[in-house]
Image (cartoon, rainbow, N blue to C red):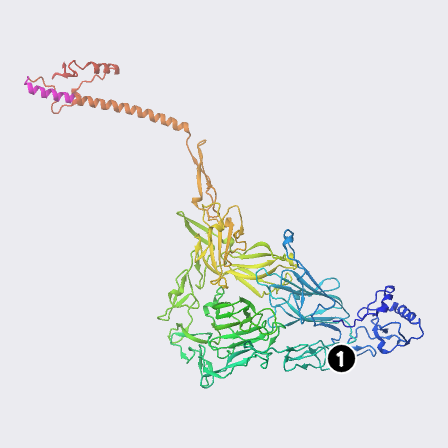
C-alpha cells in the first residue's frame, strides 16, 4: 500500500535532483531556502519555447514545504510533467504543521480543508493501514537469523534464510522453527500516534514479542513487549507511538524441541496513525465495499457475493456459483455428495419420540441439480428417545430436568437418598438427545481464524460427533463450562492434596489423514491450555484429567481434519466421537448415586468426618486411620480406604499423604545404617545439556528436585514464562506452573534469546506422590536398574527415592515415575553432583520413568561405633596411649564423632622381666621342697610295705616271733623310723645306695625295745 501523503517526482525532473539538496515528496519536505532556486530552474526549463499553454488543474498538484521553526509551511503547485505548461498558481501559506483530518476524511489541497471520502473509498486521516498480504508491503523488512550456535556443529545446521514471515493473503504468518524471524517497519511520525494490529497467538512454544524503538534505538514499553496467547480468534494489540522516528518489530522464535511443530503466529490489519496528512482516499480492496461517504474502513462482502476494487456494493453470485465471505470472485458449485450433509435428532416430543433429521452442511456450496449429485435423505423417521442422563428425570413433556438435592436417578425417576447417605454431585453425560445447557459448540475457520455461527458437533443418541465444516481445516469446537467444585472438607483443608475433582471422557477418532483432537482446559475464563493431543485414528478409549484448582473451569474439545486448506470437502467422513463425559464434585450438580456419609449424633443427617477418619459402612461412624497410612479422600469407606505408606515414609496429620522426613534407617549385612538427608531438603536445580536443535537453538533440560520436601510440602517449581516475560525485579504471575518433588522444563539461556531473563517453557511434573525410600532396586513396579549407574565401591548400598506423577499421557498410561539414587561420596561435599544415565541423556529411556544419580557426602550414613577402630601404642615411660581412627574407606558422615585419645599408666618391660625371674625362682624352690616331701612319704610307705611282707612270711614258716619291732597300736611311725637327718646331703645319698643287700632287699635299721639299734633288715 502507498503511504499517506507520499508522491513521486516526474521522470523528466529527476535529472535536476542531483543538483539539489536531498528532496523528499509527501512525507519528506523541501527546504524553504531552496524553494526559489528550484522554481527558477523549472521556469528556465519552460522558457525554451513560447508555445507552452497555461497549466490546467489536471496537470499539477499541490504539496507542502517543510515546516520551519515556527511550525508553519507553504503550499506550492508542482506539475506532473515539467515543461509542458506554464502559469502555475503562486505559493500561498499552508496549514499549521499540526493540522490533520479525521478518519474517513482527506485534505483537499486546493481549499486546504478536510473533506469526506467518497463511497467505495476510505482513509485513516493521519495514518496508514496494511490489510493486503498477497506480497510483503512496501516498506517492510523480513529478517531471519540463527540463534547462538555451537560452531563445531555449523556444517550440519540447517539454514535459517528461508525462515521468515510468510504473506498468506489476508494475514502474514510467522515461522515455526527455531530460527528468529523479525518483521520490521520504520515510520516517521509528525505527531504522536498509535500502532494497532490483530493477531492470533495460539501456541506458547513460540516466543512472540512486539516492541518499538525510538530515535535512540531504545525499546519503549518494555513490560508489554511479550504478547499473551489468544484463546478465541483474533485479538487486537495497540501501542502508543511518540513523534519522530519509530521502528516497529514483530519478532518470533520457536523452540520445538519436541517432535510436535508449534502453530504459527498470525498478524493482520496493521494500522499506524500520526504519520501525516493524506491528500487522497484509498479505494476498498477487492472483496470489500463501503456504501457510505466518510468511511474509515471497508466491509467484507457476505458469502455468495463478490466485489471488485473500489466498489460501493457487492454483486450476488449466479445460482450456479458460490463464494466465501470477502471474495473478489465467484466459483462454480460442485455436485453434492454424501459428505455435504449430516444427521441430527430433534428434541423428544410428548410421546417420548425423536425424529432423525438430515441437514446440509453450512455453508451449502454444492448443487443438487448437477449430474450425479445426491439428494438430501428423507427426514422424519421417529425412534424412541434415549433415557435421560443420570441425575435427571423425564417430565410429562418428555424433557429432562435435574433431580432436586438429596435425591439421585439413573435417568428415569428421582429417588431420595437413604438415611446415612448423601448425593454424589457431578455431571454424567452418556445420552445425547440434546446438547446440555452448560455446553456449546461452534466452528473456528482454519483460513481466517474467525468463529462462525454454526455447530461443529451434533448429538447422535449414544454419542456426539463432528459434522462437516466449511473447509476440512476448520476447527470443530465443543466447550463444557463448570462453575466450580464442592470437594470434601478434608480435601479443602489439605493444601498439599491436589485433587479437587476429575473429568473422565470416552472418545474415538476415525481418520484417513493426520487429523488432530485437542483437549484444552481454561481457568477463570483465561486462555485454554492444551492438555493432550491425539493425532490420527484412535480406538475407543478413556482419558482422565485431575482438577487441582477450585475455580470456574472450561473444558474444550477441538477437532481438525487436516491442517492444509483445499477447495471443497474431502475428509468429512473423518470424525471425532464423544461417548460419555463424567465430572465429579460439581457445585449445583446432580447425582447418579448416593454415597455413605458420617452421621450426626442424632443419626438423622450427614456430617463430615474429621480428617484422617474413614466411614464404617455398617454403623456410619468415623474411625481414625492407623498410623503411617493415608486415606482416599474421595472414597473414605471402610478400613481398606486407609492405605499403608511405603517404606521409609510416614503419614501427615491429616492422613492425606505419605512423606519422608529426610531420615532413614536401613538394615544391611547385619548392620543398621542411619541416614540424614536434611541438608538436601531444599529445592536443587540441575541442568542437562546443552542440546541443540537442527537450526542451532541451544537449550537445556532443567530439572528441579526437592528430595524430601518440607513435611510433605512439594517445594520444586517449574514455570512457563514465555507469555509472562518481565523485567527483573518485578513480580509476575506465571500462566503455567508445576509444583512437585521433581519437575522438568526447557530452558533457553538469556544470552541466546537476548532477553533479560531466561526463557522457561513446557513445565512437566515428574513426581507428585512419594512412593517410598529403600535400598532395593524395585518398588511399586518402579525399577531403578543398577547398570544405569555402575558403582565403583559396592560395600555400601545406594538409597533410592521413588515417586509417581498423576499426569497421564498417551505414552505413560499410568503416569510418570521418578527414581533418585543417593550414593555416598565423601569427596563431593555439600549438594554434590546430579547426573542422568549415559544411555538416556534426557533422564529417561522410555519417556515415562526418569532416573537420577545424586552423589554427595550427605548421602552417606551417619557414623557409628562400627565405623572406627582403636590403635593402642606401646608403653613408653610408664604411659600407654589409645587412639581411635576411621575405617578406610570412610563411608559415613556426621553421626557420632571419634572418641578422644585415651592415656593410661603402664609398667616397663624390665620390671616385668625381674618379676618373672623372681617368680620362676620361687616356683623352682617350691617344686624342689615338694619333691623332697613326697620322696620322704614314699620311703615311709615302702617301709610299711616291707614290714607287712616280712610278717606274712614269718607266719608261713612258724619261726619264733622276734622282738616286736612292728608299730604297735598308738605308736607314731615317725618315732620308729630313724633318719640320718644330721648327715650331709652327700652322706644321705651314699647311705641310700649302700643299704640295699645282695639279695635285693633294702637294709632297714630296727630298734629294740630298749631303744638301741640291734639289727638291720
**In front: 296, or 367?**
367
Q: Residue at x 45, y 64 (%)?
A: 656
* Number of numbered tags placed on the structure image: 1
**Crowding at mark 1 (Cα within 10 Å: few <14, some 14-19, many 20+):** many
Give the residue furthest to the front: 371
Magenta span = 943-959
| Location of mark 1 (residue) | 117
Q: Is residue 83 left or right of residue 865?
A: right
**Residue 613's spot in the image, x, y percent?**
41, 66
In this view of the protein, can residue 775 be seen by the observer? yes
The rendered magenta stretch, by its main secondary structure, is classed as helix
Q: Residue at x 59, y 56 (%)?
A: 700
**In front: 98, or 260?**
260
* Residue 889 highlighted magenta (yes or no): no
**Residue 811's spot in the image, x, y percent?**
50, 62
Asked which quadrant contains residue 969, the reply is top left
**SS class of the residue under badge 1?**
loop
Q: Is residue 414 left or right of residue 516?
A: left
Q: Quadrant of the C terminus?
A: top left
* Residue 951 highlighted magenta (yes or no): yes
Q: Is residue 142 left or right of residue 609?
A: right
Above or below residue 208? Residue 969 is above
**Residue 475's spot in the image, x, y percent?**
57, 72
Above or below residue 865? Residue 198 is below
In this view of the protein, can residue 523 be seen by the observer? no
**Residue 658's spot in the image, x, y percent?**
45, 60
**In front: 513, or 190?**
513
**In front: 656, or 482?**
482
Above or below residue 565? Residue 159 is above
Q: Quadrant of the N terminus?
A: bottom right
Amino acid at each position: 500500500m502507498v503511504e499517506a501523503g507520499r508522491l513521486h517526482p516526474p521522470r523528466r525532473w529527476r535529472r535536476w535532483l542531483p543538483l539539489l539538496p536531498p528532496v523528499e515528496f509527501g512525507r519528506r519536505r523541501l527546504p524553504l531556502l531552496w524553494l526559489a532556486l528550484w522554481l527558477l530552474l523549472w521556469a528556465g526549463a519552460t522558457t525554451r519555447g513560447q508555445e507552452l499553454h497555461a497549466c490546467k488543474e489536471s496537470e499539477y498538484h499541490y504539496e507542502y514545504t517543510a515546516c520551519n521553526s515556527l511550525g508553519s509551511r507553504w503550499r506550492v503547485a508542482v506539475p506532473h510533467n515539467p515543461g509542458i505548461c506554464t502559469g502555475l498558481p503562486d505559493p500561498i501559506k499552508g496549514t499549521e504543521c499540526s493540522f490533520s483530518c479525521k478518519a474517513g476524511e482527506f485534505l483537499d489541497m486546493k481549499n486546504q480543508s478536510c473533506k469526506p471520502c467518497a463511497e467505495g473509498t476510505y482513509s485513516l486521516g493521519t495514518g496508514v493501514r496494511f490489510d493486503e498480504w498477497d506480497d510483503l508491503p512496501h516498506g517492510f523488512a523480513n529478517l531471519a537469523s540463527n540463534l547462538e550456535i555451537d560452531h563445531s556443529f555449523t556444517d550440519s545446521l540447517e539454514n535459517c534464510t528461508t525462515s521468515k514471515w510468510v504473506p498468506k493473503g489476508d494475514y502474514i504468518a510467522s515461522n515455526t522453527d527455531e530460527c528468529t524471524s523479525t518483521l520490521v517497519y520504520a515510520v516517521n511520525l509528525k505527531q504522536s500516534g498509535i500502532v494497532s494490529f490483530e493477531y492470533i497467538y495460539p501456541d506458547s512454544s513460540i516466543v512472540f514479542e512486539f516492541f518499538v524503538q525510538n530515535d535512540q534505538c531504545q525499546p519503549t514499553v518494555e513490560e508489554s513487549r511479550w504478547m499473551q496467547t489468544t484463546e478465541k480468534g483474533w485479538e487486537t494489540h495497540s501501542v502508543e507511538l511518540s513523534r519522530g522516528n519509530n521502528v516497529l518489530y514483530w519478532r518470533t522464535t520457536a523452540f520445538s524441541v519436541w517432535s510436535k511443530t508449534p502453530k504459527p503466529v498470525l498478524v493482520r490489519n496493521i494500522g499506524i496513525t500520526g504519520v501525516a496528512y493524506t491528500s487522497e482516499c484509498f479505494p476498498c480492496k477487492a472483496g470489500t465495499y463501503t456504501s457510505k461517504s466518510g468511511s474509515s474502513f471497508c466491509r467484507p462482502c457476505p458469502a455468495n457475493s463478490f466485489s471488485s476494487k473500489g466498489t460501493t456494493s457487492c454483486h450476488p453470485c449466479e445460482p450456479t456459483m458460490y463464494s466465501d465471505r470477502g471474495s473478489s470472485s465467484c466459483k462454480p458449485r460442485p455436485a453434492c455428495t454424501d459428505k455435504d450433509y449430516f444427521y441430527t435428532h430433534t428434541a423428544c416430543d410428548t410421546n417420548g419420540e425423536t425424529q432423525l433429521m438430515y441437514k446440509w452442511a453450512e455453508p451449502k456450496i454444492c448443487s443438487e441439480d448437477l449430474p450425479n449429485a445426491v439428494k438430501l435423505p428423507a427426514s422424519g423417521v421417529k425412534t424412541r428417545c434415549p433415557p435421560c442422563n443420570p441425575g435427571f428425570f423425564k417430565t410429562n413433556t418428555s424433557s429432562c430436568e435435574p433431580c432436586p438435592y438429596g435425591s439421585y436417578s439413573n435417568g428415569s425417576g428421582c429417588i431420595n437418598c437413604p438415611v446415612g447417605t448423601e448425593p454424589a454431585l457431578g455431571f454424567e453425560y452418556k445420552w445425547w438427545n440434546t446438547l446440555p445447557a452448560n455446553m456449546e459448540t461452534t466452528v473456528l475457520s482454519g483460513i481466517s481464524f474467525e468463529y462462525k455461527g454454526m455447530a461443529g458437533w451434533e448429538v447422535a443418541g449414544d454419542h456426539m460427533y463432528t459434522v462437516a465444516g466449511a473447509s476440512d481445516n476448520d476447527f470443530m469446537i465443543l466447550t463444557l463450562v463448570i462453575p466450580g467444585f464442592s470437594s470434601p472438607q478434608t480435601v479443602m483443608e489439605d493444601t498439599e492434596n491436589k485433587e479437587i475433582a476429575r473429568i473422565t471422557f470416552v472418545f474415538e477418532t476415525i481418520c484417513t489423514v493426520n487429523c488432530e483432537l485437542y483437549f484444552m482446559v481454561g481457568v477463570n475464563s483465561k486462555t485454554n491450555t492444551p492438555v493432550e493431543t491425539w493425532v490420527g485414528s484412535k480406538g475407543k478409549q478413556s482419558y482422565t484429567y485431575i482438577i487441582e484448582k477450585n475455580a470456574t473451569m472450561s473444558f474444550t474439545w477441538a477437532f481438525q481434519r487436516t491442517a492444509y486448506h483445499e477447495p471443497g470437502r474431502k475428509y468429512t467422513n473423518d470424525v471425532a466421537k464423544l461417548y460419555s463425559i463424567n465430572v465429579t464434585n460439581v457445585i449445583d450438580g446432580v447425582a447418579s448415586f448416593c454415597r455413605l456419609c458420617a452421621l450426626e449424633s442424632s443419626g438423622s443427617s450427614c456430617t463430615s468426618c474429621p480428617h484422617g477418619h474413614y466411614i464404617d459402612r455398617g454403623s456410619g461412624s468415623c474411625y481414625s486411620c492407623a498410623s503411617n497410612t493415608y486415606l482416599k479422600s474421595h472414597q473414605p469407606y471402610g478400613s481398606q480406604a486407609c492405605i499403608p505408606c511405603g517404606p521409609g515414609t510416614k503419614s501427615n496429620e491429616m492422613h492425606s499423604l505419605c512423606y519422608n522426613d529426610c531420615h532413614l534407617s536401613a538394615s544391611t549385612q547385619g548392620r543398621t545404617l542411619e541416614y540424614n538427608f536434611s541438608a538436601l531438603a531444599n529445592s536443587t536445580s540441575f541442568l542437562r545439556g546443552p542440546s541443540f536443535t537442527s537450526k542451532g537453538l541451544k537449550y537445556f533440560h532443567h530439572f528441579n528436585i526437592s528430595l524430601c520436601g518440607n513435611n510433605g510440602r512439594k517445594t520444586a517449581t517449574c514455570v512457563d514464562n514465555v507469555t509472562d516475560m518481565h523485567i527483573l525485579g518485578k513480580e509476575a504471575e506465571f500462566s503455567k506452573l508445576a509444583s512437585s518433588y521433581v519437575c522438568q522444563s526447557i530452558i533457553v539461556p538469556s544470552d541466546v534469546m537476548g532477553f533479560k531473563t531466561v526463557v522457561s517453557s513446557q513445565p512437566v511434573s515428574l513426581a507428585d506422590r512419594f512412593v517410598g525410600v529403600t535400598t532395593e532396586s524395585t518398588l511399586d513396579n518402579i525399577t531403578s536398574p543398577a547398570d544405569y549407574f555402575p558403582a565403583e565401591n559396592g560395600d555400601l548400598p545406594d538409597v533410592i527415592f521413588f515417586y509417581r506423577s498423576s499426569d497421564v499421557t498417551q505414552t505413560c498410561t499410568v503416569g510418570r515415575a521418578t527414581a533418585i539414587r543417593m550414593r555416598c561420596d565423601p569427596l563431593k561435599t555439600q549438594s554434590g553432583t546430579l547426573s542422568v544415565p549415559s544411555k538416556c541423556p534426557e533422564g529417561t529411556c522410555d519417556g515415562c520413568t526418569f532416573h537420577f544419580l545424586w552423589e554427595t557426602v550427605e548421602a552417606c550414613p551417619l557414623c557409628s561405633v562400627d565405623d572406627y577402630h582403636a590403635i593402642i601404642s606401646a608403653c613408653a615411660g610408664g604411659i600407654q596411649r589409645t587412639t581411635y581412627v576411621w575405617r578406610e574407606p570412610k563411608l559415613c558422615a556426621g553421626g557420632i564423632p571419634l572418641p578422644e585419645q585415651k592415656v593410661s599408666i603402664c609398667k616397663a618391660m624390665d620390671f616385668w622381666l625381674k618379676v618373672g625371674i623372681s617368680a620362676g625362682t620361687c616356683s623352682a624352690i617350691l617344686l624342689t621342697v615338694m619333691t623332697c616331701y613326697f620322696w620322704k612319704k614314699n620311703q615311709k610307705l615302702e617301709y610299711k610295705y616291707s614290714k607287712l611282707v616280712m610278717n606274712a612270711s614269718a607266719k608261713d614258716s612258724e619261726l619264733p616271733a622276734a622282738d616286736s619291732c612292728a608299730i604297735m597300736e598308738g605308736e607314731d611311725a615317725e618315732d620308729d623310723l630313724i633318719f640320718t637327718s644330721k648327715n650331709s646331703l652327700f652322706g644321705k645319698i651314699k647311705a641310700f645306695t649302700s643299704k640295699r643287700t645282695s639279695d635285693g632287699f633294702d637294709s632297714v635299721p630296727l630298734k629294740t625295745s630298749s631303744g638301741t639299734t640291734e639289727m638291720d633288715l
